[in-house]
Structures are given as structure tokens and as C-alpha cells.
Image (tube, rainbow, N blue to C red):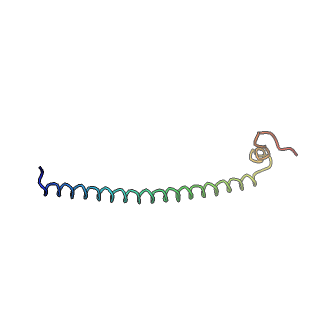
């Protein structure tokens, strides 16, 4: 029969390993949450800048010459057919 002190040492080692694993998991979980927030923030910034660029391009198109492609293309419907006048 193993000695009681050996069993107690093994139990203590297993308990410490479990605590270490729980701590590592909690740290990784916090890191994941922070990474998700950072990703969402970055995606929101990207979308904001894309919207600003889209608005600026629409402004350029609105100021373009009447005979230019931008004006001609803006008169087409989604199907590619000219808008009815």
C-alpha cells in the first residue's frame, strides 16, 4: 500500500495542476473577449471609412460632367436599363 504522504503529495500536485489550468483558461478567456472587442472596433472603423469614401465618390459623381460615364451610368437602373424619363 502506498504511503499516505505520497498520496497526499499526489493529491496536492493534482490540485495545483487544476488551479494552474483554471488560471490559464481564465486568462485566455479574458484575452479572447478583449480580442473580440478589438475586432469589432476595427470593423466599425473600417465600415465608417468605407461609408465616407462612398459618400465622397458620390459627391464626385454628382459634380461630374453631364456627358461623362458617371452621369450616364447613374441614369441606369439596377437591371442595366435606362431610367424611364
Q: Can you say whether 9 is above or below 76 in the image?
A: below
Measuring from the top left, give residue 64's x and y in whole percent. Answer: 75, 52
Q: Residue at x 73, y 52 (%)?
A: 61
Q: Please tell me in which quadrant of the rendered image residue 44 appears.
A: bottom right
Q: Residue at x 29, y 56 (%)?
A: 18
Q: Residue at x 29, y 58 (%)?
A: 20
Using the image as rendered, state which of residue 35 and residue 56 is in the foreground: 35
Measuring from the top left, give residue 23's x and y in whole percent. Answer: 33, 59
Q: Residue at x 50, y 56 (%)?
A: 39
Residue 54 as seen in the image, left or right of residue 37: right
Q: Please tell me in which quadrant of the rendered image residue 26 appears.
A: bottom left
Q: Please tell me in which quadrant of the rendered image residue 15 appears.
A: bottom left
Measuring from the top left, give residue 5's x and y in whole percent. Answer: 13, 58
Using the image as rendered, state which of residue 42 and residue 82 is in the foreground: 42
Numbered circles on residues, count: 0
In the rendered image, the residue lying farthest to the front is 1
Measuring from the top left, give residue 21's x and y in whole percent. Answer: 31, 55
Residue 41 as seen in the image, left or right of residue 69: left
Using the image as rendered, state which of residue 59 and residue 50 is in the foreground: 50
Amino acid at each position: 500500500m502506498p504511503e499516505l504522504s505520497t498520496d497526499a503529495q499526489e493529491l496536492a500536485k493534482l490540485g495545483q495542476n487544476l488551479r494552474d489550468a483554471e488560471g490559464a483558461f481564465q486568462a485566455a478567456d479574458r484575452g479572447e473577449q478583449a480580442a473580440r472587442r478589438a475586432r469589432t472596433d476595427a470593423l466599425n472603423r473600417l465600415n465608417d471609412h468605407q461609408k465616407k469614401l462612398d459618400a465622397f465618390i458620390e459627391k464626385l459623381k454628382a459634380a461630374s460632367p453631364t456627358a461623362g460615364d458617371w452621369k450616364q451610368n447613374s441614369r441606369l437602373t439596377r437591371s442595366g436599363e435606362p431610367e424611364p424619363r
